[in-house]
Amino acid sequence: MALIIGPIRFRSTRTGNREIVITRIFDAPRGFTTKASSMDLKVGGAWHFVMRHDRYGEFKNRAVYREILRPERLRYTHDSGVDGDPAAFEVTVTFEETSVKTKVTMQSVFPSAAELKRVKGFGAVEGGNQPSSGWQSGLPRASEHVPHHRP
């Protein structure tokens, strides 16, 4: 599925019955309400945040970093902030330089096909393709936490 809005291109693909892959080339606008309470960007560290959605309400989130390979990749476990969360899923975010922008690909692998179906019920694929979604609105601010490394 591809969606083009002005100079911004989005693509989501299906690669299996337990994952969603969303790719975006961006100069991202802001808009979705996401409030971070803490961020410790190191292996074993965590990002605690709350996402708010007019339709679905408020969701507590935690991302525990498993791998940080600057400037190429982040790997983390995403859960509700509760240890042992059965709905926790693994995320890999890759950053690829293009001529003037950065291509970001986010791959989420869920513990089961049933959990993926539940998450899709919240509009995860459609939301990932919207310029004001939580992960996309946070990307421009990510540089506040990660030093710039350009060859």
Image (cartoon, rainbow, N blue to C red):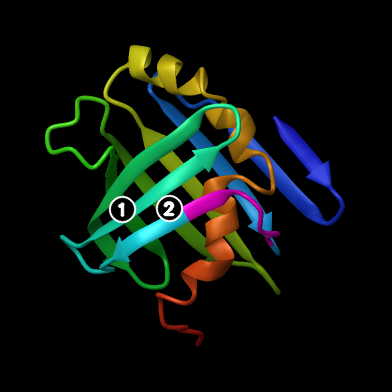
**Measured along the vertical axis of the image, is residue 39 above or below residue 51?**
below
Q: Residue furthest top?
A: 114
Q: Quadrant of residue 39?
A: bottom left
Provide residue 124's location: percent of width, then percent of height: 53, 30
Q: In the rendering, which numbered label is found on residue 93? A: 2
Q: Magenta region: which residues? A: 28-34
Horizontal side, residue 20 vs residue 5: left or right: left
**Measured along the vertical axis of the image, is residue 107 above or below residue 113?**
below
Who's the residue at 54% across and 48% down the image? 134
Residue bearing the label numbered 1: 75
In the image, is residue 69 part of the stretch drawn in magenta?
no
Provide residue 28's location: percent of width, then percent of height: 68, 60
Who's the residue at 49% across and 32% down the image? 57
Answer few, some or many: residues within 10 Å of disc 2's Cα (few below 14, many 20 plus, some between 14 and 19): some
Label 2 to label 1, Cα distance in Å?
6 Å
SS class of the residue under badge 1?
strand
